Image: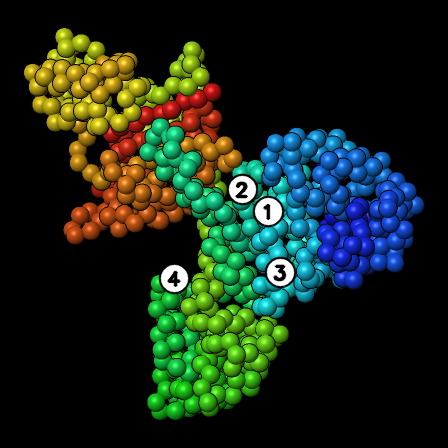
Amino acid sequence: MKNIQSIMSPKSVAVVGATNRPGSVGHAVFNNILTGGYTGVLYPVNPSQRSVNSVKAYPSLGEIPDDVDMAVIIVPAPLVKKVMEEAADKKVGGVVVITAGFKEVGGKGVDLEEELKTLVRDYGIRMVGPNCLGVISTNREVRMNASFAGQMPRAGNIAFISQSGAVCAAVLDFAKGRNIGFSRFVSFGNKADVSEIDLLRYLKDDPDTDVICMYLEDISNGREFIELCREITWIAKKPTFAIKSGRSPEGAKAAASHTGSLAGSDMAYDAIFFQSGVQRVEDIEELFHFALAFSKQPAPKGDRIAIVTNAGGPGIMATDAAIRYGLSLAKLSPETEKKLKVHLPATASLRNPVDIIGDARHERYEAAIRLVLEDQNVDGAIVILTPVALTDILNTARIVPMVAEGIDKPVLCSFMGIVDVSEGVRYLEDHGIPNYAFPEEAVRAMWSMVKFGRIMQLPRREVRRVAADRETASQLIEAKLKDDEQVMLAQLEANEILQCYGFPTLKNRLVTHSAEIEEATRAVGPPVAMKIMSRDIVHKFDAGGVKLKIQNAEAARVAFDEIINNAKAYNPRAKIDGVLMEKMARRGIEVILGATRDPRFGPICMFGLGGTFVEAIKDVSFRLAPMWEISAEIMIESIKAYKILQGVRGAPAADIAAIKDCILRLSQLAANHPEIKELDINPLIVYPEGEGCVVADSRILLKR
């Protein structure tokens, strides 16, 4: 299909449903385009009006004598189809359907939207909406406010796209109060055609846009979203931020595995954003706190931050926040401290945070800021000002951009308060220095900038392939699904597939009758673990289906009978395949590996602390498969139990390299075989560094 240029930068616009009636959407949209400085040609379309706002109106799109790049449609939902057919005859390139009453209302609205989707696909028209606020472009060659928002935002280098029109309206008001400008501003509503993917692809190459912000309720195509955002991050080098609503655990209810249960939570989205290079934020305020910093200041080269303050308390607040977010307090060089001593009073603190004392005027600020920024140990600075009687706020504000000019390091300010500092804050923001009402906010914004720098520097951003027998695994899977749409594989069958991908498994033997026990004990070798094998019994411990440390055949016979009886009592309808006798693994650290298949994002892998309480503890991390080599490393390092893997209280460090190898094997397995709906390896027992690991239990849910 065509690109969306005709929507983002149209040379002519027709507003179908434009009207002279004040308070109507048709009046607001037409008036916004007309009075907002639109540089193209504007046509009102309304069969019952001779003119709209003194501009000649046309009865239909077909009666406009010239070409029309874009049509904004504001007519009742049942009439939109007819207008769309007129747009096709007129060869309109793009439409913005502001009208509501489609999928969002259910019932007949769903059918109306499906008809629209078919029409635009067949006619090759690009469509934003329906049920949206509209499209705004501040580019000076366009200057188009094709929305019913209350005002045209000022021009800037931040793009904002949103699935919610109401959020857009609130953001515009917030931005006006904070003096924030936009390059593009798009409410895409029900995204029946143009989605966040199309908009991101446009913004990736948009020269007016340096920072991208999103409000999303869902994502149209997970794989495409991730690949595109990776290009935006690592190729276009544009910071991207997202608010994703709908943090709900409902998707986990029907899961058949630990992994499926945990992946149904919002942690999977966190992983997807991380792998995309997108920073997820909690709310609108945080979104623009971060975006503002990137839109005005250079990214820091490292995490060493200097703090200049005229009050000890706020300096401590900033220091605590910096440590909390993983920033480093820069250690100022002896030369810098020596120079500071010349300019600051004897009571000042020459170490970071640099406290220049409450009676500081702009001259003292100027010296302190300049000296810390010139220090090679400093990657960025936060300037704090508390408005006391002796503080010359405006003059201090004037020196900050002057000192920062020509120094390729970010400077963020916290002129604390609202009223007393307002004039100084206005000066700062007009001259490219973001200001935050409180020091913690400035620190969080700096942390976001540092995090982007770390993302940009991630090594090993490639998928590492491992040796595997993919063909045999596919044949095994096909055989298991021969007579069923869905089947749960217990450990014995699951291990056959895992072995095709080189997972370390234990020697075992399936026993179906007590007469087979003696030979099996001899073949496996004591001590053995005994486990019920049944596709109908997922949680073996809960069913009393596990016996450990069996030392001889006699004990194994007793255990066999107990396991079978317990399983029948637990689930009388369960089909029991037998009891697996497996070599007991020696003790180590228990971790869990898992995979699940998300309908939007495809295969997702999980790693975390293992054992029977994994769902209660939830110390896990997720990544999309196939994953980069660095992703596997970060998965391991991001769980709270990582310190245990590193070795604590005299215990040796675990074989982290072996865990990483298994994660990459799992990633390849999950990506290669879409029939794997859910998979658990729990526990994977990990031994000391250099001694590897072993699969102690596993199960796989297959589904066509």
* Quarter that holds the N terminus: top right
* Farthest-out residue, right: 65
Q: Is residue 490 left or right of residue 228?
A: left
Residue named by callout 1: 163
Helix, strand or loop under label 3: helix
Q: Are marks 4 and 2 in contact (CB under 8 Å)?
A: no
Say what amino acid the circle numbered 1 marks: Gln
Q: Is residue 109 left or right of residue 419?
A: right
Neighbourhood count class around disc 1 (C-alpha, 10 Å): few under 14, some 14–19, many 20 upward: many
Q: Is residue 397 left or right of residue 680?
A: right
In the image, which disc is placed on residue 172?
Answer: 3
Q: Residue at 34%, 40% (x, y): give it.
A: 607
Residue pictured at 28% horizontal, 43% vertical: 617
State which mark lies toward you, 3 or 4.
Answer: 3
Residue neighbourhood size for the residue with mark 2, other residues' Cα within 10 Å, grouped as few (<14), some (14–19), many (≥20) = few
Quote the CA–CA distance across marks 1 and 3.
15 Å
- State which tag comes first along the sequence, 1 or 4: 1
442 sits left or right of 57 in the view: left
